[in-house]
Image (tube, rainbow, N blue to C red):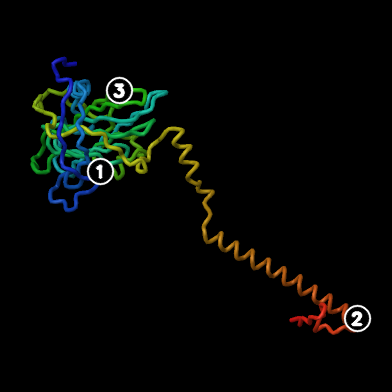
Amino acid sequence: MDSEQPKSTQYESPPTTIIGAPSPEPTRGTLSSRYQRPRLQNTKRDIPGEVIDAFHSSSWIWAAGDSAFAAPPGLTAERAFRISIPSPAGKVATTAMILITADSQYALFVNGILVGNGENTATVEIYGVTLVPTLNVFAVRGFNDIQNPVASNPAGLIAAIQISFSDGTTSLLQTDGSWRSMRGVPDKFEAPDFDDSEWANATVLVKYGGPPWGTSITFRTDTMFQIIALPSAALIGPTSAATESSLASRTPSEGAKVPVGGIVGGVIGGVILLLAIVAIILWRSKESRAERNRERGTDTSKIHFGHTIIDIV
């Protein structure tokens, strides 16, 4: 790795918006018109030098089947990218730091949740997010600039990701041929449980620093690095055994779910049946007493208890 690269860099905060919130009134045919940046807090964090080094050794990639450096422009040429990263045995993933840019635009998803977007190829964006323990899915939606609809032009995606684990260790991930790619963007492609087994491996165009992008790409100087806590309820992907057990204890299975109407109807029916049985027993008891009284010549319309006369209905 390049030992001359700075070992840490600090960033300022971008405009405040909400994770996953769509732009209220899209006015441009760009990804940023459909997605907004995540909310960041005003807390400075350093970008570790090893992550910057990893970005500088990453590769520009694009979808398999596209001509290198001659990608079609526009939304009709959108491309999808995914990679699934399982945690090593005995390790629990906690957070990820993501450095990313694209030619020309991208939207970044982690475990199905929109994290951010960018449309300035020359600027690397930095994101920090929480992860699920065992398997995490990074997905990117990108397309060539619709604002410059020439016949064809270079298009690419480049990124480096540092995953941190609960034991304090980290691992690095870069854009390369191991990413899965698709010409076009299927619905819900970013979901953790989306099946990308039929996708082809991405095409590696050139290492960082190679033409046509060169080394002119810079890191944002107005961005602070801040860990974003992704809403756990939206994480559909695999979780740890402990989490699954906890969820199972709080969530009834489909077979255990009973409609409320059925319960109420059963209770009412049972009460009616019980009352009917009691009425029959009382009626038969009354008839039996009446029969005995007739045999003894007793007035069956009245029964005496001490000095009180009770009329029998």
Q: Residues within 10 Å of mark 3 (few under 14, many from 20)?
A: some
Pick the residue in front: 105 or 309: 309
Classify 10 Å Cα crowding around label 1: few (below 14), some (14-19), many (20 and above). many
Q: 36 or 146, which lies in front?
A: 36
> With 228 as the anchor, is 235 left or right in this view?
right
Q: Earlier in the sequence, mark 3 or mark 1?
A: 1
Disc 2 + disc 1, Cβ < 8 Å: no
Q: Are marks 2 and 3 in contact (CB under 8 Å)?
A: no
Circle nearer the N terminus (2, 1): 1
Which is in the foreground here, disc 3 or disc 1?
A: 1
Residue at 30%, 38% (x, y): give it: 229
Q: Say which quadrant the C terminus sits in.
A: bottom right
Location of mark 1 (residue): 19
Residue 82 is drawn in which quadrant? Answer: top left
Question: What residue is at 14 percent from the left and 20 percent from the top?
Answer: 6
Q: Secondary structure at mark 2?
A: helix
Tell whether 292 sits left or right of 82: right
Report the Cα–Cα distance between label 3 and label 1: 25 Å
What is the CA distance from the residue labelled 2 to the residue labelled 1? 89 Å
The residue under label 2 is 295
Q: Which residue is painted at 20% across and 26% down in the image?
A: 47
Q: Identify residue type, mark 1.
A: Ile
Q: Nearer the viewer, residue 254 or 46?
A: 46
Residue 274 placement, left or right of 118: right
Name the residue tied to disc 3: 171
Question: Which of marks 3 and 2 precedes in the sequence?
Answer: 3
Would you identify the image quadrant in which residue 127 lies? top left
**Could you say where residue 141 lies in the image, as x and y percent from the top left?**
23, 39
Q: Residue at x 53, y 48 (%)?
A: 255
